[in-house]
Image (cartoon, grey):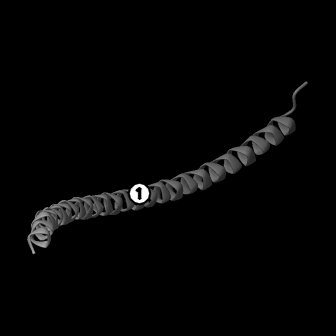
Amino acid sequence: MITLNSIEQLANRLAELLTKLKDENEQLKKEAHSLRQKVSEKDLEHIRETKELQRTIERLERERMMLQKEKAQLDNQMKSVYDKLNALLPEQSEQGHNS
């Protein structure tokens, strides 16, 4: 037969368990809040890094285009110098034969 004393003991144990569960629940809520903050910070850090990476990519792309333009100009200058030198050589050899 269940006595009043055993019911009180069960109620006390249940109350203790409920208190422990409430404390654990509060602790877990605090941890979850802390983790959400950390995730938010990491998200912001990721956004900053992504923007910085994009700026770097854009800067490198501008530099690449500028270098390509400079290379094309140098190639044209080299071709022009080559053509001029090439044009001079036959004249010099003709003058050498006429002397």
What is the x, y in percent for residue 96? 14, 72
> Can you name the residue that lies furthest to the right here?
1
On screen, residue 53 versus residue 93, left or right, reads right
Relative vertical location of residue 25 with respect to residue 56 in this rendering, above or below: above
What is the x, y in percent for residue 55? 28, 62
Nearer to the camera, 35 or 62: 62
| Residue where numbered disc 1 is placed | 46
What is the x, y in percent for residue 7? 81, 35
- Image quarter for residue 74? bottom left
Nearer to the camera, 81 or 19: 81
Amino acid type indicated by mark 1: His
On screen, residue 9 versus residue 63, left or right, reads right
The C terminus lies in which quarter of the figure?
A: bottom left
- Image quarter for residue 88? bottom left
Residue at point 13%, 63% (across, down): 90
Relative vertical location of residue 2 with respect to residue 27 in this rendering, above or below: above
On screen, residue 29 versus residue 48, left or right, reads right
